[in-house]
Image (tube, rainbow, N blue to C red):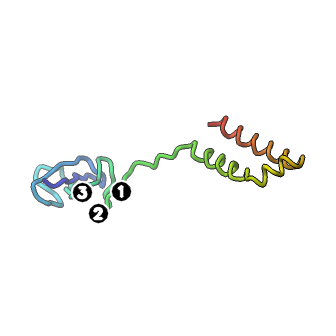
């Protein structure tokens, strides 16, 4: 059996199997629908006449941007910066500021 998508108005309306490879309009389909072989396309995917594409928007984790900012700030806290924090007031202030920024970002998660 070969997996096929039933496409209506450029959108996969159903997925079925036929014993052989088929394409185009087939008996029993609504007018304007066609059958296209595909191992991957799912219901709701788009068909442009040559390629299937997933119509679902990419899911973006809104926390990812905050986690990236935290990682970037943590990467700035190097051994050298820690030595400066131990030896100078300016270093202590810089470290306290970096820690405060990281804490504020973590609180927003």
Secondary structure of the residue carrying tag 1 is: strand
Please report contact status of discs 2 and 3: CB closer than 8 Å, yes or no.
no
Expressed as whole percent of the image width and height from the top left, the position of residue 88 reads 89, 49
Tag on residue 33? none
- The residue closer to the viewer here, 57 or 95, is 95
Mark 3 secondary-structure assignment: loop
Q: Which residue is mark 3?
A: 38
What is the CA distance from the residue labelled 1 to the residue labelled 3?
11 Å
What residue is disc 1 on? 53
Labels 1 and 2 touching (C-beta < 8 A): no
Residue 108 location in percent, x, y? 65, 36
At 72% from the left and 53% from the top, the residue drawn is: 76
Q: Position of residue 80 (x, y in %)?
A: 78, 55
Q: Which residue is mark 2?
A: 49
**Relative to 26, does residue 66 appear above or below in the rendering?**
above
Q: Earlier in the sequence, mark 2 or mark 3?
A: 3
Mark 1 or mark 3: which comes first in sequence? 3
Q: Residue furthest right?
A: 89
The mark lying in front, picked from 1 and 2, is 1
Q: Is residue 53 left or right of residue 64?
A: left
How packed is label 2: few (under 14 Cα within 10 Å), some, or many (20 or more)? Answer: few
Residue drawn 11% across and 58% down?
Answer: 20
In the picture, measured across the screen, residue 80 lies left or right of residue 11, that is right
The secondary structure type at the circle numbered 2 is loop
Q: Position of residue 94 (x, y in %)?
A: 82, 48
Residue appearing at x 47%, y 46% in the figure = 59
């Amino acid at each position: 059996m070969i997996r096929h998508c039933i496409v209506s108005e450029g959108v996969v309306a159903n997925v079925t199997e036929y014993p052989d490879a088929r394409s185009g309009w087939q008996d029993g389909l609504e007018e304007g629908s066609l059958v296209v072989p595909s191992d991957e396309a799912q219901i709701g995917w788009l068909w442009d006449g040559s390629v299937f594409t997933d119509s679902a928007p990419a899911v973006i984790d809104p926390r990812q941007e905050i986690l990236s900012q935290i990682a970037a700030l943590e990467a700035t806290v190097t051994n050298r910066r820690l030595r400066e924090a131990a030896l100078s007031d300016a270093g202590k202030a810089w470290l306290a500021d970096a820690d405060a920024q990281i804490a504020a970002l973590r609180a927003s998660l």
